[in-house]
Image (cartoon, helix red, strand yellow):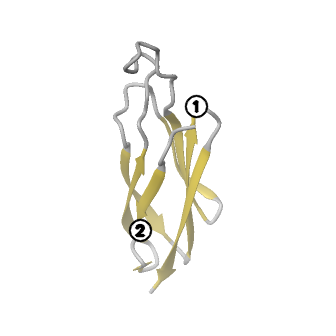
Amino acid sequence: MAKDVKPRVKVPKSAAAGEVVTIKTLISHPMESGQRKDKDGNLIPRSIINRFTCEFNGAMVVDVTLEPAISTNPYIEFDAKVDAAGDFKFTWYDDDGSVYEDVKPIEVA
């Protein structure tokens, strides 16, 4: 399990019905490829975020597969249409089986 993994998400607090909003996500994660060595010459085990999903009120908005070449602390930005108030649920899946989640509400003004 990666240490000090912290998801961060920026979602507007409110939007008009039918408005398209921009959502920004970043997760602090070392994204080890499994090819680097530590100071003693031992391989550092592979540990990457391999999948990211976002759901809005239970409906899938985005589902992304991430590959080993992705950078440390992956940043993902995307647009989503908001038809009603609800919750965005963000999920990051790690190679080691760890799952990191965050939920952000949005109101319809």
User: Is label 2 in a helix, a strand or a loop?
Assistant: loop
Indicate which disc residue 41 carries.
none
Q: Which residue is mark 2?
A: 11
Residue sitting at x 41%, y 12%? 41
Q: Amino acid at mark 2?
A: Val
Within 10 angstroms of label 2, few (less than 14), some, or many (20 or more) residues? some
Disc with the residue nearer the chain's start (2 vs 1) = 2
Residue lying furthest front: 40
Q: Amino acid at mark 1?
A: Asp
Residue sitting at x 43%, y 49%? 27
Residue 89 appears in the picture as rendered: no
Residue sitting at x 42%, y 59%? 8
Within 10 angstroms of label 1, few (less than 14), some, or many (20 or more) residues? some
- The relative height of residue 55 versus residue 85 in the rendered view (above or below) is above
68 or 34, nearer to the observer? 34
Q: Position of residue 69 (x, y in %)?
A: 37, 25
31 or 52, nearer to the observer? 31
User: Is label 1 in a helix, a strand or a loop?
Assistant: loop
- The relative height of residue 23 versus residue 13 in the rendered view (above or below) is above
Q: Position of residue 32 (x, y in %)?
A: 43, 28
Q: Position of residue 104 (x, y in %)?
A: 51, 69
Residue sitting at x 40%, y 21%? 38
Residue 31 appears in the picture as rendered: yes
Q: Which residue is mark 1?
A: 95
Q: Quick check: 61 left or right of 31?
A: right
